[in-house]
């Protein structure tokens, strides 16, 4: 696929690799638009059950291509800046709305919208080289940018999110692992295999159950009561499916064998 990224399919798993390595995979407007189309289109592609997101070259994604941003500022058009913000926001929302689990595989730099894209993934694995930061606050803008003020506190807590967003300091892989932002830290050459193992674990579960689980996780429930209402509705819908009956039968057989000492 053109426009700055490529897609490869392996069974039910697709790998999307950002591919502007000469620009450290910085996103220009064309790339943002085509990425948004890709993630939006996943809703109609049930044959794809999991997506790995990676970057080529030396980095995952260094953020927005500042050459395009500087051109907007030179023209002095507030309307153009608003348009860029809205387009970038649509990309992050499209990622969160995709029904398939997204697994981020990050190395090198993940800054600005690149950091937001990593946060928009459901699972995240990082190489030891990974360095992340909220770049916008370092260039005189707000650290609350392209969904980061919503996603980051939910993942690492409000205190650590405030630290990262107010200072723009770099968070390295080991700190991110300790904070729960990463599921594991591995060598760069092991990132893809790590992602494929996680995808295989997901694929062992029923497709509809996985989709509903992601939907419930993404719902911004305002209280325990509303979260449990979503959970109850989903369980009532799923309890009559063949997938549930088959999985329950297999579980009972396994449990009987364990109790019998077999």
Image (spheres, rainbow, N blue to C red):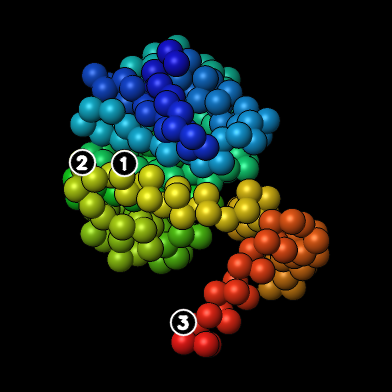
Q: Is residue 28 left or right of residue 149?
A: left
The secondary structure type at the circle numbered 1 is helix
Q: Is residue 180 above or below residue 215?
A: below
Name the mark nearer the viewer: 2 or 3. 3
Residue 36 image point, x, y percent:
55, 27
Q: Residue at the spot x=45%, y=20% of the render?
A: 31
Q: CA distance from mark 3 to mark 1?
A: 36 Å
Q: Residues within 10 Å of mark 2 (few under 14, many from 20)?
A: few
Q: Is residue 45 left or right of residue 166?
A: right
The secondary structure type at the circle numbered 3 is loop
Task: Residue under label 1, please give it.
Answer: 192
Q: Is residue 8 above or below residue 30?
A: below
Out of 141 and 213, give the one closest to the viewer.
213
Task: Residue under label 2, please give it.
Answer: 189
The secondary structure type at the circle numbered 2 is helix
Q: Is residue 26 visible?
A: no
Q: Residue at the spot x=52%, y=20% of the render?
A: 34
Tell me whether circle 1 and circle 2 mark residues in contact (CB < 8 Å): no
| Residue 241 sits in quarter | bottom right
Q: Is residue 186 visible?
A: yes
Residue 128 image point, x, y percent:
19, 50
Residue 208 image point, x, y percent:
68, 50
The earlier-in-sequence mark between 2 and 3 is 2
Task: Residue under label 3, please give it.
Answer: 262
| Residue 91 sits in quarter | top right
Q: Residue at the spot x=38%, y=63% of the render?
A: 180
Q: CA distance from mark 2 to mark 3?
A: 40 Å
For the N terminus, the quadrant is: top left
Q: Residues within 10 Å of mark 3 (few under 14, many from 20)?
A: few
Task: Give residue 253's mark.
Answer: none
| Residue 21 sits in quarter | top left
């Amino acid at each position: 696929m053109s426009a700055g990224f490529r897609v490869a399919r392996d069974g039910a798993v697709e790998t999307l690799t950002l591919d502007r390595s000469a620009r450290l995979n910085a996103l220009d407007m064309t790339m943002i638009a085509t990425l948004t189309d890709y993630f939006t289109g996943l809703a109609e592609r049930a044959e794809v059950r999991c997506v790995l997101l990676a970057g080529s070259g030396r980095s995952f994604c260094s953020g927005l291509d500042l050459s395009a941003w500087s051109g907007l500022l030179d023209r002095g058009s507030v309307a153009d800046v608003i348009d860029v913000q809205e387009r970038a926001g649509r990309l992050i929302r499209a990622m969160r709305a995709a029904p398939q689990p997204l697994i981020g595989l990050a190395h090198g730099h993940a800054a600005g919208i690149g950091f937001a894209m990593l946060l928009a993934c459901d699972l995240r694995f990082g190489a030891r080289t990974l360095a992340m930061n909220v770049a916008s606050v370092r260039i005189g803008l707000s650290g609350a940018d392209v969904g980061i003020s919503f996603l980051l506190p939910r993942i690492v807590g409000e205190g650590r999110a405030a630290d990262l967003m107010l200072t723009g300091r770099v968070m390295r892989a080991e700190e991110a692992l300790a904070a729960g932002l990463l599921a594991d830290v591995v060598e760069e050459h092991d990132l893809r295999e790590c992602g494929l193992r996680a995808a295989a674990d997901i694929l062992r579960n029923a497709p509809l159950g996985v989709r509903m689980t992601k939907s419930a996780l993404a719902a911004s429930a305002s209280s325990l009561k509303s979260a449990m209402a979503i959970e109850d509705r989903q369980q009532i819908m799923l309890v009559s499916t063949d997938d549930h009956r088959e999985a329950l039968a297999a579980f009972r057989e396994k449990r009987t064998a364990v109790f019998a000492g077999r």
